[in-house]
Amino acid sequence: MIRVDRVATLIDRLNTAIGRATIWLLLLSVLVSAGNALARKFFAVGSNAFLELQWYLVGTMIVFGAAWVLKENAHVRIEIFSARFSRRTRNWIELLGHGFMLLPFAGAMVALSWPFFLRSWEQNEASLNYGGLLVWPMRGIIVLGFCLLFLQAVAQIYRAIQSFSRH
């Protein structure tokens, strides 16, 4: 059990580090957006690459942030219901939800998005927009983000099971 606990702690630390680093993408996204808007307004120059970069930055924040949000237990819940349940009932809901909904979903997303990433990478796929960015890095970020979410779900399931043995 100590080994599993160490692995769960490593997963927590990994997702915390990535989540905290990802926060800075918000500032970068705002700067890119403002720079692009100012360039269009004052110099009549726009950039498809900057527009796409904004989407890539926001998408990366969402995909990489999901595992950290799960770890921090900050995801959306219907508090009106869950607050009324005992801790044990909430643990059961968490265990069943993560085990039967989140794990299969995250696993399916990894399995389904992996071939798209590989094909995109092999073809060095780029945006169809003039001056756009490469597409394959974002496809890789999607795969990696769902891998992180899958791992965090495993850690959360372990912690939920552990909580039953403590009570």
Image (spheres, rainbow, N blue to C red):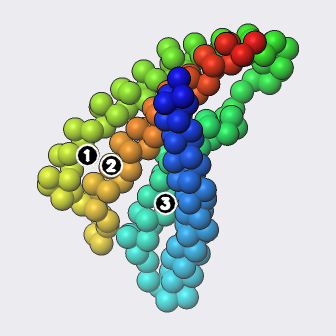
Label located before the other in sequence (3 or 2) = 3
Residue at which label 2 appears: 139
Which amino acid, by three-letter code, is at mark 3? Leu
Numbered disc 2: secondary structure: helix
Above-or-below relation of 144 to 18:
above
Q: Quadrant of residue 104?
A: top left
Which amino acid, by three-letter code, is at mark 1? Phe
Q: Residue at x 58, y 27 (%)?
A: 156
- Local packing at callout 1 (Cα closer than 10 Å; few below 14, some 14-19, many 20+) is many
Residue 5, image x, y percentages: 55, 30
Above-or-below relation of 81 to 53:
above
In-front residue for pair 60/90? 90
Q: Residue at x 61, y 36 (%)?
A: 70
Residue at which label 1 appears: 117
Instruction: Give the Cα distance between marks 1 and 2.
Output: 5 Å
Residue 53, image x, y percentages: 43, 65
Numbered disc 1: secondary structure: helix
Residue at which label 3 appears: 57
Label located before the other in sequence (1 or 2) = 1
Label located before the other in sequence (3 or 1) = 3
Q: Residue at x 14, y 52 (%)?
A: 122
The quadrant in which the C terminus is found is top right
Which amino acid, by three-letter code, is at mark 2? Arg
Numbered disc 3: secondary structure: helix
Instruction: Give the Cα distance between marks 3 and 1.
Output: 18 Å
Q: Quadrant of residue 51?
A: bottom left
Instruction: Give the Cα distance between marks 3 and 2.
Output: 13 Å
Residue 155, image x, y percentages: 54, 30
Position of residue 20 in the picture relative to residue 3 (left or right): right
